[in-house]
Image: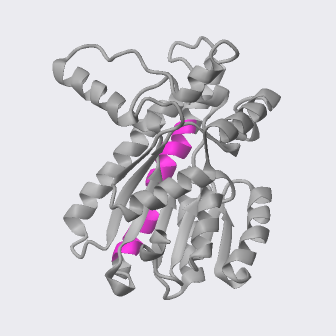
Amino acid sequence: KMAEKLFVPGTVAVITGGASGFGLEAARRLGALKLRLAICDLFEDDLRKAKDELQNIVGGPANILTFQCDVSDLNQCAAFATAVDNFRGNTKIGLLFNNAGIAGPSAGKLSLLDEDKEVVAKAWPKVFAVNVFGAAYIINQFVPRMIAQGVLPDGKKAYVVTTSSVAGLVTFTSGPYTSSKMSATSISEQLSNELREIDTPNSVEAVSLHPSMAGTGFWTTGAKLGLSKDSPTMKAFSKFVAEKGLNAPKVVEAMLRGLVSGKSFILVDGPGDDPVGDVLQERVDAIKSGRRMPEPRPLGLQRMLMGFFFFFF
């Protein structure tokens, strides 16, 4: 109910990575709040299934746009933005959920010292292309439009929520995923600073979302992209995380509550996690003192999995 205060019915929610996981759940929630939906995703089959479901929530196909887009390609992001312009007409964008992301091979765990040159050469560029460049490209194409549209009806703000991760604040493991999410956090901060300088009506607000380990199809995307093999173990792991830890509905609910509370950094701890705010304070203390970073603390679900198999987010 509180989320109803945030958004203007009839405005548009733009969602990248919108055909699964956090993106699809956000589309469900926002569609139920009577926002029109413009979602993009890389996978055409997922988009088709999402549209079939969502058009029943938003009142028919006229209120939803689906668009196949690789966010790591600036030209495709530009084409998506143009398609959204044609879809929305004079309707304003109320939310940009800058959410598309991938884990990469081994769910993002890849040593800087890995001896497999082929894996290193494939994984690092691809993960950064989506999680970093893709986030920047989407901001580049949509936020100027959001600034130009001015304040929403009733003086409400539009929001740009970029999906980072708890790993975008505290290093839990090695590999391109953690490094890319640190960069995504920085991109959101940079956007906030730029908006402070140029968005004089304060009509657009930048927010970063930092969930802990969550069970979604995110864990098996690497296989779809050819970065890793299709693994029954990973599918079982994703199901386990969704049941025992966070899942898309819990994360999206936390996101909406964070927006209602006016937060610029939305931290979503998982069951059994040491509060990320406390872990982050240890990091700050180490930087201030110049000492080596403390050993990464495992997340709650990682502790549960020790002795069987160990995954990192």
- 194 or 117, which lies in front? 194
Percent of width and height locating residue 312 = 57, 25
Q: Quadrant of residue 237?
A: top right
Answer whether residue 201 is visible to the viewer in this image: yes
Percent of width and height locating residue 181 = 46, 39
Vertical comparison of 117 with 224: above or below? above
- 301 or 195, which lies in front? 301
Q: How is the image coloured?
A: one colour
* For residue 60, side relative to residue 285 (left or right): right
Percent of width and height locating residue 311 = 62, 23
The residue most toward the bottom is 90
* For residue 54, side relative to residue 192 (left or right): right
Residue sitting at 52 percent across and 12 percent down? 113
Residue sitting at 44 percent across and 21 percent down? 297
Residue sitting at 69 percent across and 58 percent down? 19
- In the image, the segment drawn in magenta is 127-147
The verdict on residue 131 being magenta is: yes
The verdict on residue 20 being magenta is: no
Q: Quadrant of residue 51?
A: bottom right
Answer whether residue 138 is visible to the viewer in this image: no
Percent of width and height locating residue 41 = 66, 57
Quarter of the image with the C terminus in it: top right
